[in-house]
Image (cartoon, rainbow, N blue to C red):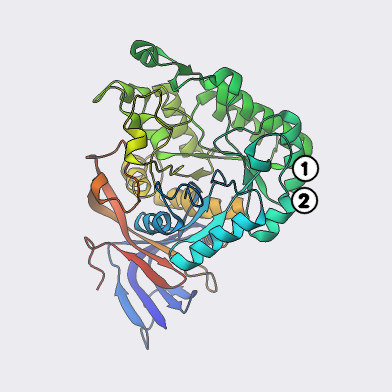
Amino acid sequence: MKRLLKGGRVVDPANGRDGIFDVLIDGDRIAEVGASLSADGAEVMPVAGLVICPGFIDMHVHLREPGQEHKETVATGTAAAVAGGFTAVACMPNTRPVNDNAGVTQLILQKAADANLARVYPIGAVSRGQKGEELADIAELKAAGCVAVTDDGLPVATAILARRALEYTSMFDMPMIEHCEDPSLKGDGVAHEGPVAASLGLRGIPGAAEAITAGRDILLAEMTGGHVHIAHMSAWTTIEAVRQGKSRGVKVTCEVCPHHFTLTDDMLAAPIAYDTNTKMNPPLRAARDRDAMIAGIADGTVDAIATDHAPHHYDEKNVEFDRAPFGIVGLETAVSITLDRLVHTGVITLSRMVELMSVNPSRILHVPGGSLAAGAVADITILAPDLQVTIDKTRLVSKSKNTPYHGWSFTGGVAATIVGGRTVYSNPAVKLT
């Protein structure tokens, strides 16, 4: 089956293309990109006024299955992903049981095949059971389909374990993804250490807790030649450590989440004090930290925007702030937030957005995507940059509804998501016929 996307703005930085073109899809591949292509024998999808991008890849999500299906499943998580414009997601290993062996990896891949929506790339655990005591069998995880390793939700427990993981993963050209926090500094903190937390009587987590572990692992990556990827970066001191590492040629990459470049810890006090939908780890930090994330996105230090999609059941979040789990959902809000707060404000271009959400995640994880070149897989995100979007948590596709953005309005959204040449999501608010 052939399909012709007609008259859209193609933004494809991997191939130096940004202009009005047609995109011809043949089966599950891109056949041709060019001006005024023939529609002979092809179904035509008119996309004038829309933006055609290589499929977005969220390299940091929690799908919760196996073990916590009351929060999310692979099926509901990938449905949320395609509704949010993501053609692929990489899922964290802190499932129950932990994804530290081929059996769990294969289960996740089978669930993804059954759902047949977004592509799913499992990420394996660094340590067995994420206990920080001994390495998981990284070779087995790689052979089973894992694209990286991490103990996300926890830092790699010791410097020697992180060193061994970096040495091991470098043999397979895999990144070690690090959840950066020094447990002794974090302690039982639940919010960013600062005046807001102090005024609310909440125990604090200093930004230094993140930067110390990031600095450790950047030095270890430099020593071993391995690739460390700093997950959900939030502190200005962390981004400085990343800049310094990159200036020395260290294999270090990093990601920032939308909530860390839009929100600050002021949200803890207003408009609703102690709203557990503002509780995440790393926490919302001060304006200086948020502004540093924006600057890093603009100047190229930041490699990727990822959501850290962390679904939790309503009952789990509807408790005292100290007792609530960390995390918010993000798959269905990230594109609108990024368009509204970064692109439409002139902080970044659409081409840079595509780099952050497609090209670079593909490169970091060594997975297909990031390009609309002829012969490339036909994974495509179609954006409606002027669409008015109001976040309504009751209408989220995700099984969980824990978002701080309920009621917020943004300019820009997703028109359609195409995976392997199939339209797996079409926004009813955008006319595509």
Please identify the quarter of the rendering in which residue 102 is found: bottom right
Q: Is residue 52 left or right of residue 113?
A: left
Q: At 48% across and 46% down in the image, what residue appears?
A: 62
What amino acid is at disc 1?
Glu
In three-dimensional space, the C-alpha distance between marks 2 and 1, rounded to whole angstroms, equals: 7 Å
Residue at disc 2, secondary structure: loop
* Crowd around label 2: few <14 · some 14–19 · many ≥20 (10 Å): few
Name the spot of residue 277 as percent of width and height, x first.
Answer: 34, 33
Q: Are marks 2 and 1 in contact (CB under 8 Å)?
A: yes
Q: Quadrant of the C terminus?
A: bottom left
Judging by the rendered image, the residue that carries numbered circle 2 is 171
Pointer 1 local density, CA inside 10 Å: few below 14, some 14–19, many at least 20: some
Residue 244 is situated, as x and y percent measured from the top left of the image, at 64, 29
Along the line of sight, which residue is nearer the eye, 419 or 191? Answer: 191
For disc 1, the marked residue is 167
* Residue for point 40% across, 43% down: 311
Placement of the N terminus among the 4 image quadrants: bottom left
Residue at figure coordinates x 40%, y 55% from the top left: 81
Specify the label residue 187 is tagged with: none
Is 250 left, or right, of 33 in this rendering?
A: right
Instruction: Give the vertical position of 404 relative to 89 (above or below).
Output: above
Query: Which amino acid, mark 2?
Result: Met
Residue situated in front as seen by the camera: 424 or 109 = 109
